[in-house]
Image: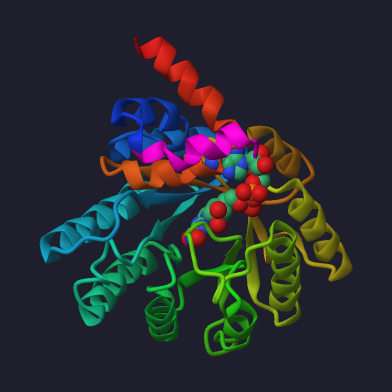
């Protein structure tokens, strides 16, 4: 990323909200469930699967967490009614993790039960390191009882290889792991910082998942990692249904099309909802052309 882009990334919180909203619109399906369903329908027509994410995080009121649970039940009903190829992703701090872990676990169990009734699946996103232990605890416990959950591990975390070793294995309830680099700002004490170090740990973690027979969802837009992943898929002779690639809505559609054309299964992360700001800021921080986009929006907005 250029020095100017880095400077802008550091000052993003000062950028007016309407400009952030305009530039980040590409990353979000819209404010409503209907917006998300329309985008998922289009992705399915293009041969991609989807995972629907209700935006929102860090809630401190029980009512907001319960409202999110209700919304996820509507999401599963709509997926079933429309016959969409989609599952859901959830954030535990939206479902009340910071209110009370037991309350959050019960909420996730309600969502997982609704998913199971429709033969569907729930992915638990991984948030910052204050959530890692509780996320893995809730995942392990509910995967044991429901069997239709997956979790996320971050290649930048030093603990990730150890966490992989402790995941549930078949036949007790085989694990399903989305592997990504990781997006939160973590101290060096617990997270690798070098770009190439994180890449190397991603490849090591992916190979370990494959060797242990754990289903990997390979979440990256890094062409180097996509190439490394396809080499590992070939080396270990994985069949098409034994893994998937995942990408975010609004990021590198060309790479998405290349992976689909090569015959891989690919799922797009489709966020929707009114609480779009924190997610959008995280996405803009990763956009190597953020400065150009923001300046263009500023000029257009005058
Ligand atoms: P990298 O950041 O190096 O990007 C590679 C290239 O992709 C860039 O050079 C650029 O061309 C393009 N690119 C990446 N981001 C872009 C953007 N926002 N706009 C425009 N271009 C962009 N993290 C986490 O901590 N917990 C989680 O649960 C998840 N969940 C998740 C789901 C899915 C489906 C994906 C794809 C990613 C996540 N992430 C995540 C985010 C992940 O940790 C990581 O921050 C981003 O995917 C960016 O990392 P890349 O591997 O794409 O590499």
Of helix, strand and loop, which mostly describes the magenta segment?
helix
Residue 22 can be seen in this image: yes
Residue 90 figure quarter: bottom left
x%, y% of residue 62? 13, 66
x%, y% of residue 157? 58, 72
Question: In percent of the image, x 26 and y 65: which residue is there?
Answer: 95
Q: Which residue in the rendered view is the most extreme toward the right?
A: 235
272 or 163: which is nearer to us?
163
Locate the C terminus and report the quarter of the image it occupies. Answer: top left
Residue 110 figure quarter: bottom left
Here the colouring is: rainbow
In the rendered image of this protein, does residue 215 appear above or below residue 45? below
Residue 44 can be seen in this image: no
In the displayed structure image, the side of residue 288 where residue 106 appears, left or right: left
Question: In percent of the image, x 30 and y 65: which residue is there?
Answer: 93
Q: Does the magenta segment cover residue 96?
A: no
In the rendered image of this protein, does residue 212 appear above or below residue 124? below
In the displayed structure image, the side of residue 257 where residue 8 appears, left or right: left
x%, y% of residue 259? 73, 44
Q: What span is colored magenta in the figure?
A: 1-13
Question: In percent of the image, x 46 and y 37: which residue is there?
Answer: 27
x%, y% of residue 21? 35, 30
Locate the N terminus and report the quarter of the image it occupies. Answer: top right
Question: In percent of the image, x 56 and y 40: which residue is there?
Answer: 6
């Amino acid at each position: 990323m250029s020095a100017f882009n880095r400077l802008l990334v550091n000052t993003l919180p000062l950028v007016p909200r309407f400009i952030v909203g305009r530039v980040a619109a590409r990353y979000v399906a819209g404010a409503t469930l209907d917006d998300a369903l329309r985008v998922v329908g289009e992705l399915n027509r293009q041969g991609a699967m989807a995972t629907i994410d209700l935006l929102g995080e860090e809630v401190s009121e029980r009512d907001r967490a319960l409202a999110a649970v209700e919304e996820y039940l509507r999401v599963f009903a709509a997926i079933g009614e429309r016959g969409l190829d989609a599952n859901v992703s959830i954030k535990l701090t939206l479902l009340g993790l910071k209110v009370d872990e037991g309350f959050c676990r019960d909420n996730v169990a309600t969502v997982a039960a609704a998913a199971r009734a429709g033969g569907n699946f729930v992915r638990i996103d991984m948030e910052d390191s204050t959530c890692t232990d509780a996320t893995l605890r809730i995942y392990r416990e509910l995967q044991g009882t429901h069997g239709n959950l997956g979790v996320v591990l971050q290649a930048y975390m030093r603990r990730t290889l150890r966490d992989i070793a402790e995941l549930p294995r078949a036949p007790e309830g085989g694990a399903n792991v989305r592997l990504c680099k990781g997006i939160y700002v973590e101290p060096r004490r617990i997270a690798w910082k070098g770009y190439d170090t994180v890449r190397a740990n991603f490849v090591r973690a992916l190979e370990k998942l494959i060797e242990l027979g754990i289903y990997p969802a390979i979440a990256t837009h890094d062409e180097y990692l996509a190439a490394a992943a396809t080499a590992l898929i070939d080396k270990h002779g994985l069949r098409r249904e034994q893994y998937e690639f995942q990408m975010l809505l609004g990021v590198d559609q060309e790479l998405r099309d290349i992976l689909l054309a090569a015959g891989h299964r690919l799922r797009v992360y489709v966020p929707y909802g009114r609480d779009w700001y924190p997610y959008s800021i995280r996405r803009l921080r990763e956009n190597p052309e953020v400065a150009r986009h923001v300046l263009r929006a500023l000029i257009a907005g005058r």
